[in-house]
Image: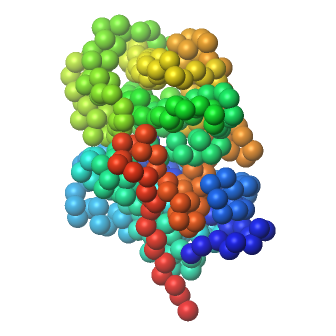
Amino acid sequence: MMISNAPDQHVNILGLMTGSSADGLDLCLVKFSGKNRQPIYEVLDSHEIAYPDLFHQKFRSPLDITEAEISNLDNELGKWMAAEITKLNLSFDIIASHGQTIKHEPPHFTLQIGNPRFMSETFNCPVIYDFRTADIELGGQGAPLIPIVDQYLLQQESSDVLALNIGGIANLTMVPGSHSPAPIVAWDTGPGNTLIDKAVRLFTKDRMAFDDGGYLAAQGELNKKLLHLLLEHEFYQRTPPRSAGQEQFGDIYFQELLKLFYPGDEQEFKDFIYTLTVLTAKTISRSVNSLSADYFASTMFVGGGGALNKTLMELLRRELPSIDIRKMNLNGINQSNKEAFGFAYLGYLFINNLTGNIPSVTGARKAVKLGQLFYSEIG
């Protein structure tokens, strides 16, 4: 499918994102007008839909899912997404779906589930999916993919800009000015919310899924010894390109932390949550400070659920006092829908036969078109 060459031609793409926090589905319906890398866009609608308990439980421990369960969950998630989208009564031409990551082990493989067949049949439209494999097949990390979206949205002529997304994993993008000879660079900085969320669920016996506003962390104090141990993780010693997931910072790692330090009372739990929050801020700031002298940014836009954690944002401002840190808020795009918007844009690149990865970011040997097309045409 291609967009017509007519100058007034447009396409409505529904971007779907299910992230490493495994809390639900983010949707962003976008109208794109044009056929080059810089289309005019309009955000038509956005929604956040919480996962049912089964998906919550399974997707938060993806490494525990058996091969037999993967096939079943692939179908169940695809059916659920089709059913939830139906309830919204939206009008769109194409769906671009990231899917739920179950395994991500570059340079070997990556796996996102959410069978596109059910959405394609339900809405009689093409579904673009499996956005990471093509990059991995060329030696890349298959991540992060949103930097090309950061470039599209945020690039300025002469000023460098930073973009940060704090989901389960945190990732950073440096977008140099369009006149700069320096390449765009990006990488995963380490855990974003994932370790904090696990600690909160343990502390509250699953009554809370995350530290709302950073309230619990704000009542804790830093455990310097624990922070020092946390910062020794080999992931932080790797030079970019690098990507992280549950393989590095999932349940196995969290259980190892609990063997080193198991909170003995309520205050120690709050200290634990605060220390994990400091870890996220420290690893982000270290990544920013590791940028070469070729880059200089005075502004950083923050998206993802971590942008709503006031304690984390205060720590980041303390760690990076010379940078103006702002929540993402740009023409209908905010901290909640940015990644879903991003996959709508990656879907737009796909249908226009444009490359979607950035080799300087992922480490792939060359730029390549990302995604696969599923279209079960009815009629």
Q: Does 74 appear above or below 172?
A: below
Q: Residue at x 62, y 45 (%)?
A: 152
Q: Does 229 appear above or below 155?
A: above
Q: Does 248 appear above or below 13?
A: above
Q: Is residue 89 left or right of residue 260?
A: right
Tell me residue 278's x, y (percent). 44, 17
Q: Choose between 41 and 49: the one closer to the eye.
A: 41
Tell me residue 151's x, y (percent). 59, 41
Q: Choose between 356 and 16: the one closer to the eye.
A: 356
Q: Residue at x 72, y 67 (%)?
A: 10
Q: Choose between 34 and 92: the one closer to the eye.
A: 34
Q: Residue at x 46, y 60 (%)?
A: 369
Q: Is residue 33 left or right of residue 286?
A: right
Tell me residue 333's x, y (percent). 68, 44
On the rendered image, what quadrant is the N terminus found in?
bottom right
Q: Choose between 206 and 82: the one closer to the eye.
A: 82
Q: Residue 328: which quarter of the image?
A: top right
Can residue 138 be seen in the rendering of this structure?
A: yes
Tell me residue 257's x, y (percent). 26, 24
Q: Residue at x 58, y 66 (%)?
A: 352
Can residue 25 be seen in the rendering of this structure?
A: no
